[in-house]
Amino acid sequence: MDAVFLARLQFGLTAGFHFLFPPTTLGLSLLLVIIEGLYARTKNEVYRRLSVYLVRILGTVFVMGVATGIALEFAFGNNWAAYSRTVGDVFGAPLAAEVVFSFFLESVFLGILVFGRNRVSPKTYRLSAFLVFFGAHLSGLWIIIANSWMQTPAGFRMEGGRAILDNFWQAAFNPSTVVRFVHTILGGWTTGALVAMAVAAWLLLKGRSAAAAAALMKTSLAVFAAAAILQLGSGHAHSMQVTKTQPAKMAAFEAQWETMDGAPFTLFGIPDEKNERTLLAVRIPKMLSMLVYLDPGGRVLGLNEFPKDERPPVFLPFVGYHLMILFGLLFILMGAAGVWLQARKKLATSRRYLKLLLFAVPLPYLANETGWIAAEVGRQPWAVYQVLRTSEAVSAVVPAGNVLFSIILFGVLYALIGAAGLAVILRTIRGGPDGEAAAGGQGGA
Amino acid sequence: MESWDFLRNIWFLLIGLLLAGYSILDGFDLGVGALLPFLAKNEDEKRSLIGAVGPVWDGNEVWLLAGGGALFAAFPMAYATVFSGFYLAMMLVLFALILRAVSLEFRAHDPARKGLWEAAFVGGSALPALLFGVALGNIVVGVPLDTRTEFTGNLFTLLRPLPLVFGLLGLCAFLLHGSAYAALKSEGALRLRARRTALTLAAAFGGAFFLSLVMVRIYLPAALKSVPAWAFSALVWLSLALVAAAVKKGRDGRALFFSSAAFLGLWGIVGAIQYPILVRATDPALSLTIANASSSALTLKVMLIIAGAGMPLVIGYTIFAFRVFKGKADVSGPGY
């Protein structure tokens, strides 16, 4: 196995595993802020208990995110030394800014949320919840800035083989930053909200803590349904941007082999890269042009427009992109069904819907991961689009065997902490929002 | 050009300060973690020590990420060379830090495997406390670099006498710092044990520091000509003496203050020996310096604005959080 492939696998494994947690944090921290706000306004004890409950879950999720994020801060130097030397002048600053502006904020105030409830005033506690929410989202912004610069680099010049910063704001708010940020944040809200809905559904199915469960369901359903609908718009805007700025990636998403006026949208198909065709394709005529240009006759560039050595792989981006869209549409249906049941006051008793929510928990995670895989594999063969090839970005001095060793090391480690983390979160959830049953939750050390 | 030089110097200093801040803040919780089985004799004592670091360790560890991120942004060439060159050693440190990060949460909430997570906390604290010094010792004494500033050694290149002694010194410094913090945050028998341990560790620190000076004399004799380095080593000796005196008098807060000052002294020595070198190469012509490893003037300026806007806030709310958790640690109450 070659070193480039192993380095990509290593980064994919560590970043992909990490990416389970921050989206959950985004959604849960939003819910926490809403619930703390409702508590401040209504003084209803139910909201205080829900806040305690959410903080316990959030605490574990956050720690998992921290633990799995450590490796990523150093990964560019470890496995991607040539990348770091070539683009560090532009790329390093957003990573450092994330730490300075967001990571400190989240970590310090999460400490107060988890340990300080009896030590600060309710007002300070509420502010701490807001700062964790704010820090998590700001953190997302800096990471999306860094990632977007790899996709649509701007604000720099090449000098002696190195990318040199010309304009910080152009680099930070490059053509894909804003739309990707909104898209990712909404994905996080969907994720956290669906987790909370599933927790509420489980409590309702078990007939436990009915008032708290109903309140949690109502709040998280509102966030979920709104985020799912908004995601349709943000996903659409994101596709239009990709078509404009990374046409080869859009061609891979859609397995569009030939340039076409009025290109169809492929609902289903199996891309056959060798023969440049899509097997068993089910297509909606002119739909793709309609979606990405709002013009049924719009010209979509095909992969054949690009030199062979500048084409991304097709299979993974195609499958990832289509699965993500499928999940996104499912979320809209689920949100609509929930709102409909809620309006008829049947939500707490619709056992079928509640059970569906339990089984749906993996879906937002799959949506986040498939979307991310589509975006990053679709960027290939570039580490930085049309600036630096992935094959030229790896560390020259790290032998493939060492990378393989680290993959095994992290694979075992992440399997261990993933399993233990899930067990801890499930245990906390089983403890319920009424507190005392959660033996592990309160001073259970 | 002149302002570019100025910015490079500022960033040399700031990265030093970030790393010093890291060792002073995360240093005490690494030390407490590594000392846990030696200081705490029963579950209550363990909980009291864990409770003392629980609310703050995460914020403390962020200083390491800040140092790493600032190194990437300000001196990408040094970041790339060191982190790819020290690959396996860094994987071990990351492995330890990741296990440590989850260990307290899991120890509290996964009772079936409590022993495993406690071991992860202890080992995950001790290993980085030892290896940070080894890594620093290597970039101080010099590593083999080729003309493209790529590291040409392997894992065993890193295990030479001076780096190993620096590792020992770092470990002693973290443990001393941890025992001082443990004394400050505990009561009764545990506090007495922490103070006794602190006295032993202050002596061990002194021994390791003397040995380090001998190593520098052997392997890096030119460093002995640095007057600032001598001034900083005087600060280290003075701080050590004051730590011991404060511990004896039961002034725990003062002991922690002077063990922090000892860290500042150590970083001062490293800075004085290294400047303007970031990574010393065996062939001096190939060393990575603040001139040939830095980012552009614009990036350094942007970074300075980011640090200038962000770090005062960080320091402000970190002080706020430490005041929230002031006093002896909770044994009961929310959390672990």
Image: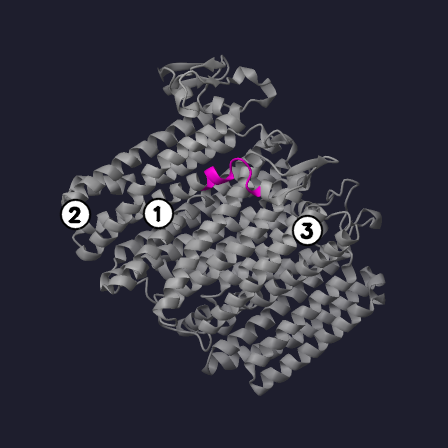
Q: Is residue B171 magenta?
A: no
Contact check, label 3 and label 1, Cβ < 8 Å: no
Q: Secondary structure at mark 1?
A: helix
Q: Given the image, on which type of amino acid does mark 3 rest?
A: Leu
Where does label 1 land, which residue?
A192
Where does label 3 land, which residue?
B300
**Residue A26: x, y in percent?**
40, 49
Find residue B167 and report its image quarter: bottom right
Depth check: give the residue in front, B224 or A112. Answer: A112
Q: Given the image, on which type of amino acid does mark 1 rest?
A: Gly
Q: Quadrant of the C terminus of chain A?
A: bottom left
Residue A384 shown left or right of residue B222 in the figure: left
Spatial CA distance of label 3 from label 1 is 37 Å
Where does label 2 land, which residue?
A348
Part of the protein shown in magenta: A172-181
Pair 2/3: label in front: 3
Residue B140 vs A390, above or below: the answer is below
Chain name for mark 3: B
Residue A6 vs A72, above or below: the answer is above
Residue B236 vs B267, above or below: the answer is below
**Residue B105: x, y in percent?**
41, 59
